């Protein structure tokens, strides 16, 4: 049977442009479906650079203006891999052209933008998803399965951190290629939207709605040279953010993120404590889920390190890869996301996180930044 084509138009060719392209190339080999992904066009402003990228990854054509790309009739899905301040405009234009959309996280600069995007995709009825890819690391997906099976019992605590150290140098400029994350006009916020957004998405998925938050943020380096203006300018992002929260299910949460934790490159960890079971996961050891099960026999009760690489259906996604015991990596989370997106198209049951799901994280981010400004508890707005 001839497969239905899913013709991708990708905007941006940086870190995520490469991660997504790799996933599109892998998905048909490891997760066969009735769809065939076609790398139709890649887009960026620099004609030479995007041409070289397209040749390397196998895109059929290039564009230098994203507005042209979203209007092309030979594109089915627009993949938004650009800085955060462009997500909304591209998503609205793609929606107007009835394209499906895969949008990088965070969904938007703030909840108001996110709401506009949700309203647009829902009105147009276009398939949509946001790349909160950590949900699809098999050990994390297994954690979700254990929570959904009710094994943890009543949940008391959720704690997460995401630590990096790459912005400690005071003479690092802000803005432009590679450094847009330090420029509030391009990023919207600092570590909260960039790193905590992932932690919040995972936590909502595992532990449900956050009701209220109390946060503190700090900008350790107050001024940096701006690459686009050539002038020393005020830094508007949060360099570090710590917050505590109350969940709708009665549990308590605490979160920390910084780019000033010397020695840490991408230390994302979470722990969830329930009355019967606790779970712990660490991105640096991503194929393991640490499990403490109070129901184990007392003599041998203790933390177990589950190597989530069995190819039985017990270990999510792993039956599609190698033989038991062999690990897959960070990149596979993107492949899983594309596979699930296609499954959503084929079954008519959209897979999350949709724009609507991602808006919930955006509401939490707004509440955090608001709380940090006023030093008070803030109720998270309903999405
Ligand atoms: N899911 C994840 O784990 C994850 C990881 C990293 C980044 N992200 C998100 O992905 C997005 C991109 O981040 P990145 O790390 O890939 O950034 P990057 O700086 O590596 O790449 C950004 C790309 O956007 C392109 N771009 C900028 N302006 C453009 C324009 N006007 N027209 C066309 N292209 C334009 C740049 O040329 C570049 O190729 C951000 O929203 C970020 O938050 C998500």
Image (cartoon, rainbow, N blue to C red):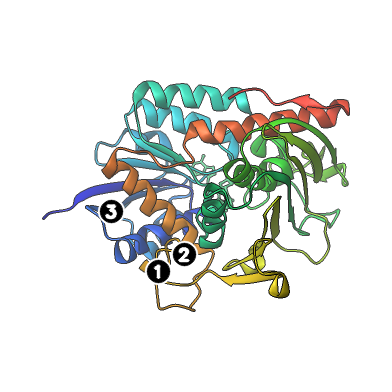
Which residue sits at x=46%, y=72%?
310
Q: Residue furthest left?
A: 1
> Is label 2 in a helix, a strand or a loop?
loop
257 up-or-down from 117: above or below: below
Residue 38, disc: 3
How far is mark 1 from mark 3, CA to CA? Answer: 30 Å
Per the image, label 3 sits on a secondary structure element best described as strand
Q: Position of residue 297 (x, y in %)?
A: 66, 69
Answer whether labels 3 and 2 touch (C-beta < 8 Å): no
Q: Nearer the viewer, residue 135 or 294?
A: 294
Which quadrant of the figure contains the N terminus? bottom left
What crowding class fits label 2: few (fewer than 14 Cα within 10 Å), some (14-19), or many (20 or more)?
A: some
Q: Is residue 241 left or right of residue 86?
A: right
Q: Is residue 76 left or right of residue 225?
A: left
* Pointer 1 residue: 312
Query: What separation in Å lies between label 1 and label 2 (alpha carbons)?
Result: 6 Å
Q: Which residue is mark 2?
A: 315
Q: Residue at x 78, y 36 (%)?
A: 236
- Image spot of residue 288 (x, y percent): 60, 68
Mark 2 Cβ inside 8 Å of ligand 1: no
Indicate which label's residue lies in the foreground, 3 or 2: 2
Describe the element under mark 1 as helix, strand or loop. loop
Number of marks present in the image shown:
3
Residue 12 visible here: yes
* Quarter of the figure with residue 289: bottom right
| Viewer-nearest residue: 261 or 309 | 309
Residue 247 on image: x %, y %? 70, 35
Query: Which callout, 1 or 3, points at the residue further toward the start of the chain?
Result: 3
Nearer to us in this view, 91 or 371: 371
């Amino acid at each position: 049977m001839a497969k239905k084509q899913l013709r991708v138009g990708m905007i941006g060719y940086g870190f995520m442009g490469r991660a997504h392209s790799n996933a599109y190339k892998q998905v048909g080999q490891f997760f066969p479906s009735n769809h065939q992904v076609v790398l139709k066009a890649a887009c960026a402003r620099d004609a030479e650079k995007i041409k070289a990228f397209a040749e390397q990854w196998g895109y059929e054509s290039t564009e230098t203006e994203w507005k042209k790309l979203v209007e092309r009739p030979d594109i089915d899905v627009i993949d938004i891999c650009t800085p955060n301040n462009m997500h909304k405009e591209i998503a609205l234009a793609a929606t107007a052209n009835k394209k499906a959309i895969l949008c990088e996280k965070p969904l938007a600069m703030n909840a108001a933008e996110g709401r506009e995007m949700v309203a647009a995709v829902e009105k147009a009825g276009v398939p949509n998803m946001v790349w909160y890819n950590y949900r699809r690391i098999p050990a994390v997906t297994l954690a979700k399965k254990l929570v959904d099976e009710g094994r943890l019992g009543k949940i008391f605590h959720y704690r997460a951190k995401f630590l990096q150290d790459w912005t400690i140098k005071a003479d690092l400029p802000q803005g432009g290629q590679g450094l847009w994350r330090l420029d509030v006009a391009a990023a919207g916020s600092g570590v909260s939207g960039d790193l905590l957004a992932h932690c919040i998405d995972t936590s909502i998925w595992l532990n449900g709605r956050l009701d209220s938050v109390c946060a503190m943020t700090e900008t350790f380096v107050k001024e940096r040279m701006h690459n686009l203006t050539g002038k020393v300018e005020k830094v508007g992002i949060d360099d570090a953010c710590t917050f505590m929260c109350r969940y709708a299910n009665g549990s308590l949460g605490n979160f920390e993120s910084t780019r000033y934790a010397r020695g840490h490159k991408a230390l994302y960890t979470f722990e969830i404590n329930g009355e019967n079971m606790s779970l712990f996961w660490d991105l640096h050891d991503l194929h393991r889920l640490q499990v403490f099960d109070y129901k184990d026999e007392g003599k041998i009760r203790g933390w177990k390190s589950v190597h989530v690489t069995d190819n039985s259906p017990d270990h999510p996604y792993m039956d599609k890869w190698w033989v038991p015991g062999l690990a897959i990596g960070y990149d596979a989370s993107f492949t899983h996301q594309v596979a699930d997106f296609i499954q959503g198209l084929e079954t008519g049951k959209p897979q999350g996180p949709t724009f609507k799901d991602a808006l919930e994280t955006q509401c939490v981010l707004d509440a955090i930044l608001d709380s940090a400004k006023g030093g008070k508890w803030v109720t998270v707005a309903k999405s």
